Image: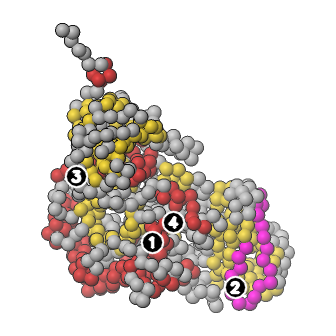
């Protein structure tokens, strides 16, 4: 009898992937994959918040930071910063321009590392202005980096009382480094405050709103949640500089700016002009969550300043102030319009509740002091708002003594719903910890991997890059989170945004400059998980897998089922330098239909995206017309692959 030999292709398939389609496991949280936002790297002011004028109310510690006097050689005039009879006592400083009329005299604003101006688009300029003497003409002008006048308009006939004036400007050219100038023509004196310049095209075209392109790239991820406002800014370097949500709502002009902790945190990346205007405040965060269909996840201060800084503690006898802030926040988000804080929300234009279900108590705290404070918060909040799931901290690292202490204490307390774990480590750690949650207690608190990012060099290194190797290591790690969806309820990369010229930390998920934006390979990894979330985990078995001495496996995989579409979704990561052919078995499934394959890959593990090549590493999708159980599939080197196919 003639011996039957396997085909050469079948012989190459030494790896097999078996998806047990008829043995569904844990349900997957709808909000499994989400976003972490912090005002770092000029992520809010100069970023997501679309205001182009820096220090618009002269409220920085140096009231003229961001501003420069315009005084040609023939000009005679004075520029003064005053506080008498201000437009608003909450932000009392304003500028007085007094011109002798010999030549144009005024001030210019540099924006946030320049102002990104687009040809033909409309920019709304507004100012609070008061005439003091004379009848000067005030010119509002946009200039390019080379000194070219791009747009100009004029204001006249000013009242002796504060009034708001608004005009529009349309630049004749595109310039990423523009500036705004306000100059007087003719003899006279005026007072200026609340100088603003917004692109007309904001997200949903809301006046004074958010950067449209930046929100769109977030919405394109289809995130399940948005964590805000941080991060370390929640804590503050000292308690006086902590984030206080009540100072960020109501009329924008009433919100008092605060120095950003990233202004002074890193001596190697100083940002002395980094302040929080709170134009992006808690109301806008909740509104953004609603816009992009993401669960709101606010984080509040627990009575502890950042333990990497002062570690200042609120005395326990005063902790009720912080707890009351939490109770008031729940009422602001969810309360009826007849309640005190619900009425404040309604007055801002949102009568319906925001339906908040998650609340973080502290950011990255550790030690007995945190447990003592968290316990007090939990006792009150669980009694008054059992519908709110509380998220507790677990320190800054994923497996040190601080981490172990916190987890043990939280298990003892029995009132911790979700524990927020953080990890910034090299790619090897993420590859090697794919099985981290396989042995977690299924009955204890659930896990929120609230901050993760592979570091190509080392944590806090300015040389870190968002390369493909880091992205694939995160993808491998996320397959482990997905397989353990009964324990891990949520995950988010951090930080979210980085301004190309004003960052304090790298790597970041998304990079922007004043006109452009791109997602990193890491962005596309999380997008692939979020867009292919599924509803239930399917058990998966891998055979023929090899593991290196450092714990890196040659293939990683997870599988889920999408109940709405009737599809099985298989995610596979091949981090190695060789293509892997694997047999895909789907026992327990019938009527397997055609599907589609999406692949994220590059030519090298060091590949990165850039403003010049924003999609050098980006997903590409093709149809799979002949997919069936037992078929052999090729997984390219350096790749993440998502296969969706119909299966009954």
- As measured in the structure, the alpha-carbon distance from the residue carrying label 4 to the one carrying label 3 is 40 Å
Percent of width and height locating residue 565:
37, 50
Q: Residue at x 64, y 90 (%)?
A: 85
- Span highlighted in magenta in the image: 147-167
Q: Residue at x 33, y 70 (%)?
A: 358
Q: Which residue is disc 3 drawn over? A: 25
Mark positioned earlier in the residue sequence (1 or 2):
2
Mark positioned earlier in the residue sequence (4 or 3):
3
Of the 4 image quadrants, the one containing the N terminus is top left
| Residue 606 appearing in the image | no
Mark 4: give few (<14), some (14-19) or many (20+) Cα within 10 Å: many
Could you say whether the residue bearing mark 3 is in a helix, strand or loop? Answer: loop
Image-based side of 431 in relation to 519, left or right: left
Along the viewing direction, whichever of 592 and 59 lies nearer the viewer: 592
Q: Which residue is disc 2 drawn over? A: 163
Mark positioned earlier in the residue sequence (3 or 1):
3
Could you say whether the residue bearing mark 1 is in a helix, strand or loop? Answer: helix
Q: Is residue 161 magenta?
A: yes
Q: Which residue is disc 1 drawn over? A: 286
Q: Is residue 481 magenta?
A: no
Q: Residue at x 22, y 52 (%)?
A: 25
Q: Quadrant of residue 300?
A: bottom left
Farthest top residue? 1
Q: Which mark is residue 11?
A: none
Q: Which residue is disc 4 drawn over? A: 44
Mark positioned earlier in the residue sequence (4 or 1):
4
- As measured in the structure, the alpha-carbon distance from the residue carrying label 2 to the one carrying label 3 is 63 Å
Percent of width and height locating residue 216:
53, 58
């Amino acid at each position: 009898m003639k011996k039957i030999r396997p085909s050469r292709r079948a012989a190459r398939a030494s790896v097999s992937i078996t998806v047990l389609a008829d043995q569904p496991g844990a349900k997957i949280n709808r909000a499994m994959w989400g976003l972490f936002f912090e005002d770092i790297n000029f992520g809010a002011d100069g970023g997501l918040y679309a205001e182009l004028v820096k220090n618009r109310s002269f409220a920085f510690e140096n009231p003229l930071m961001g501003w420069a006097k315009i005084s040609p050689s023939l000009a005679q005039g004075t520029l003064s910063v005053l506080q008498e009879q201000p437009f608003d006592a909450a932000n009392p400083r304003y500028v007085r321009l007094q011109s002798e009329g010999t030549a144009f005299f005024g001030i210019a604003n540099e924006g946030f590392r320049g102002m990104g101006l687009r040809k033909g688009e409309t920019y709304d300029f507004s100012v609070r202005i008061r005439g003091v003497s004379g009848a000067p003409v005030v010119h509002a002008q946009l200039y390019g980096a080379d000194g070219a006048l791009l747009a100009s308009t004029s204001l006249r006939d000013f009242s002796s009382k504060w009034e708001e004036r608004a005009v529009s400007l349309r630049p004749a050219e595109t310039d990423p480094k523009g500036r705004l100038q306000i100059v007087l023509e003719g003899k006279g004196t005026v007072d200026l405050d609340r100088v603003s310049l917004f692109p007309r095209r904001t997200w949903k075209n809301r006046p004074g709103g958010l950067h449209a392109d930046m929100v769109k790239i977030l919405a394109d991820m289809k995130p399940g949640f948005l964590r805000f406002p941080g991060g370390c800014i929640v804590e503050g370097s000292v308690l006086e500089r902590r984030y206080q949500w009540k100072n960020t709502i109501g009329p924008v002009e009433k919100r008092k700016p605060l120095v950003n902790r990233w202004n002074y945190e890193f001596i190697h990346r100083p940002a002395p002009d980094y302040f929080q205007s709170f134009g992006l405040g808690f109301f806008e965060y909740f509104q953004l969550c609603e816009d992009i269909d993401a669960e709101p996840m606010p984080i509040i201060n627990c009575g502890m300043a950042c333990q990497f800084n002062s570690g200042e503690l609120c005395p326990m006898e005063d902790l009720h102030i912080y707890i009351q802030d939490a109770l008031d926040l729940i009422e602001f988000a969810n309360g009826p319009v007849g309640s005190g804080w619900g009425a404040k929300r309604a007055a801002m234009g949102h009568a319906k509740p925001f339906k908040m279900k998650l609340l973080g108590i502290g950011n990255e705290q550790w030690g007995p002091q945190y447990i003592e404070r968290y316990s007090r918060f939990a006792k009150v909040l669980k009694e008054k708002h059992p519908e709110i799931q509380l998220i507790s901290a677990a320190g800054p690292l994923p497996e040190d003594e601080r981490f172990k202490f916190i987890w043990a204490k939280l298990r003892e307390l029995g009132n911790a719903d979700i524990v927020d774990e953080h990890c910034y480590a090299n790619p090897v750690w993420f590859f090697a910890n794919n099985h981290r949650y396989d042995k977690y207690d299924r009955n204890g608190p659930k896990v929120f991997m609230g901050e993760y990012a592979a570091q190509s060099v080392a944590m806090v290194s300015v040389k870190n890059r968002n390369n493909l190797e880091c992205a694939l290591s995160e993808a491998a790690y996320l397959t482990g989170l997905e397989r353990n969806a009964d324990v891990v309820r949520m995950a988010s990369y951090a930080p979210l945004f980085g301004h190309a010229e004003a960052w304090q930390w790298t790597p970041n998920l998304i990079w922007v400059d004043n006109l452009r934006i791109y997602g990193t390979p890491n962005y596309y990894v999380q997008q692939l998980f979020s867009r292919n979330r599924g509803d239930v985990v399917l058990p998966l078995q891998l055979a023929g897998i090899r593991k290196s001495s450092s714990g890196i496996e040659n293939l990683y995989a997870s599988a889920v089922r999408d109940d709405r579409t009737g599809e099985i979704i298989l995610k596979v990561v091949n981090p190695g330098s060789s293509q892997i052919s694997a047999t895909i078995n789907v026992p327990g499934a019938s009527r397997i239909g055609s599907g589609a394959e999406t692949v994220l890959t590059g030519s090298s593990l060091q590949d990165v995206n850039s403003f010049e090549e924003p999609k050098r590493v980006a997903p590409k999708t093709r149809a799979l017309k002949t997919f069936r159980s037992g078929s052999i599939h090729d997984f390219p080197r350096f790749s993440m692959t998502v296969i969706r196919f119909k299966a009954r």
